[in-house]
Each structure stands twice: as structure tokens, then as C-alpha cells.
Image: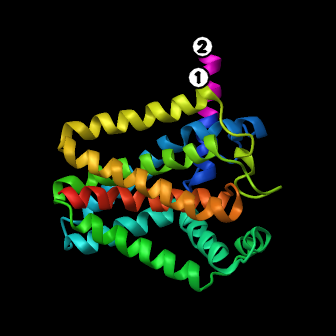
């Protein structure tokens, strides 16, 4: 049992190391198999990132207006993750918007430079995210940040579980073999736990609207990239997370 817990702790640390820039020991027991298994902890890492954003918001809203506090909370998530998912969003829209074929789109997505489509998509998503959160009651913002970050990463896990990886190499390569049933169950239970906690603090109808927005965002972004690529890449996982997160906030804002 103790050995199993140690292995799981290392797998979680690998997920944290892969998805964030938080200071961690350099050697956390990397193996390709463990990095692939780390997918199960993506929603848990999302809850941690959302928790950091919530703490920044709660601290800064005591000093600054809510809108400025939300901008600072957003900056905190960018620093914590190294804009990992935002980069994927921009690359996805550059590739989909500028590539006439699947091969051309994938080539564009590998380019480190940001283009017009990516810049517009990134700016709109970040602005909409802050605006949607600003529309919520102050008491709901911190919880929305935590749950939104967790569930949007669960949305990415569902892409891994139900789609095909489209590159020979890349940031999404560890997920190329998909996710095991046990791993998917672990990720799903993490998301359900977040929803259960949210139900204690938010009206059920509001949370249902948020989940509806998340589902709509998940389906919409997959419709965009799977029609062109025939599957997913590491960049599109980032795009899925970003679109799912903002769609969750929009759903909550539509009700509250």
C-alpha cells in the first residue's frame, strides 16, 4: 500500500511538473509510463491552479476593484502554468485558420510565432473569461475559478479518451496511447468531487448552466479541430481546456 501511494504521488508530481511551472524537485521519478499515467491527475492539477487563482482574487479584491482583482488572478494562472494552455489555444486557431489541409495546419501549429487567428482567439478568450467572472456575485467567483479550472482539464481528458493523437511527436505525445479505464475513472471522480462541493455553495440550476456551457464548449472546439485534423494534438488539448473554462464561466453568468 505504501509503495503504491509513493508511486501515485510521483505520478501526480509528474502531472504537476508537466502542466505547471511550480517549483518542484527536478527528479520526481520520471518514466514514460508514469508520464502517460499522469493524465488521470490533470483535473486535480486544475483544481490546484484554480485554487491559486482564487486565493489571489480573494487577497487582491480587498485592495482593488473586482475587475482588477480578476485580471491579477488571471495573471497568476498564466504565471503558474507558463501560459501552457493559452499557447495551445493560439496555435490551434492559427493552424485551423491558416492551414488549408491537415498537414498544413499541423505545420503551422508547430511554429512558435503567433499569427492573426491565434492572437484574436487568445485575446477574445482571455477578455471573455474576465468579463464572465466579473458578472458573477463576488461570493461565487473564487469557487467558479477552482471548479472551472478543474472541470476544463477534465474536458481535455475526455478528448484523450475518445479521440486520436495526430502527431508522431509533440507535447501531447505522452497521451498518444489514450487513457486507461482506471485513469479515466480517477479523473472523472475528481471532477465529480468538485461538482459536489460546488453544489453546496451554488444554486443547482446555476451549476447546471455552467456544466451545460462546459459541454457546449467541449463539443464546439472538437467540431472545429477534429474536422480539420481528424483527431487531437497537444495544442488542441490546450484549446479544449481554455474554451471549456470560459464556457463554464459563461454558463454560470447566464444564470447568476
> Looking at the image, can residue 31 be seen?
no
Image quarter of residue 222: bottom right
- Up the image or down, 221 lies above or below 32; here it is below
Q: Residue at (40%, 52%) from the top-left corner?
A: 214
**Is disc 2 surrounded by few (<14), some (14 to 19) or many (20+) residues within 10 Å?**
few
The residue that mark 1 highlights is: 5
Could you tell me if the residues under marks 2 and 1 are in contact, i.e. CB atoms within 8 Å?
yes
Q: Which residues are magenta?
A: 1-10
- Residue 7 horizontal side relative to residue 208, left or right: right
Query: Could you tell me how many numbered marks the image carries?
Result: 2
Q: Position of residue 172 (x, y in %)?
A: 70, 53
Q: Examine the image and state in which quarter residue 111 appears.
A: bottom right
The local secondary structure at tag 1 comes to helix
Verify whether residue 4 appears in magenta: yes
* The C terminus - image quarter: bottom left
Q: Would you say the magenta stretch is mainly helix, strand or loop? A: helix
State which quarter of the image contains the N terminus.
Answer: top right
Colour convention: rainbow
Q: Position of residue 88 (x, y in %)?
A: 60, 65
Q: In front: 128, or 19? A: 128
**Label 1 Cα neighbours within 10 Å, binned few <14 / some 14-19 / many ≥20:** few
Point 42% across, 50% down: residue: 215
Amino acid at each position: 500500500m505504501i509503495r503504491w501511494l509513493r508511486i501515485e504521488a510521483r505520478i501526480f508530481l509528474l502531472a504537476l511538473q508537466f502542466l505547471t511551472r511550480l517549483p518542484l524537485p527536478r527528479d520526481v521519478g520520471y518514466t514514460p509510463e508514469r508520464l502517460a499515467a499522469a493524465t488521470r491527475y490533470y483535473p486535480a492539477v486544475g483544481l490546484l491552479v484554480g485554487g491559486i487563482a482564487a486565493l489571489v482574487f480573494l487577497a487582491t479584491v480587498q485592495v482593488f476593484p473586482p475587475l482588477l482583482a480578476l485580471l491579477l488572478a488571471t495573471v497568476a494562472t498564466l504565471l503558474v502554468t507558463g501560459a501552457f494552455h493559452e499557447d495551445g489555444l493560439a496555435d490551434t486557431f492559427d493552424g485551423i485558420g491558416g492551414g488549408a489541409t491537415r498537414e498544413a495546419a499541423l505545420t503551422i501549429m508547430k511554429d512558435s510565432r503567433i499569427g492573426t487567428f491565434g492572437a484574436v482567439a487568445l485575446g477574445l478568450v482571455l477578455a471573455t473569461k474576465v468579463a464572465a467572472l466579473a458578472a458573477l456575485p463576488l461570493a461565487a467567483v473564487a469557487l467558479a475559478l477552482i471548479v472551472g479550472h478543474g472541470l476544463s482539464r477534465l474536458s481535455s481528458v475526455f478528448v484523450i479518451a475518445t479521440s486520436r493523437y495526430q502527431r508522431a511527436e509533440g507535447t501531447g505525445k505522452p497521451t498518444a496511447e489514450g487513457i486507461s479505464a482506471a485513469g479515466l475513472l480517477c479523473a472523472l471522480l475528481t471532477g465529480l468531487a468538485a461538482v459536489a462541493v460546488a453544489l453546496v455553495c451554488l444554486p443547482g440550476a446555476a451549476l447546471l448552466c455552467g456544466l451545460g456551457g462546459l459541454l457546449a464548449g467541449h463539443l464546439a472546439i472538437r467540431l472545429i479541430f477534429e474536422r480539420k485534423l481528424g483527431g487531437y494534438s497537444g495544442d488542441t488539448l490546450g484549446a479544449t481546456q481554455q474554451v471549456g473554462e470560459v464556457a463554464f464561466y459563461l454558463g454560470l453568468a447566464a444564470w447568476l
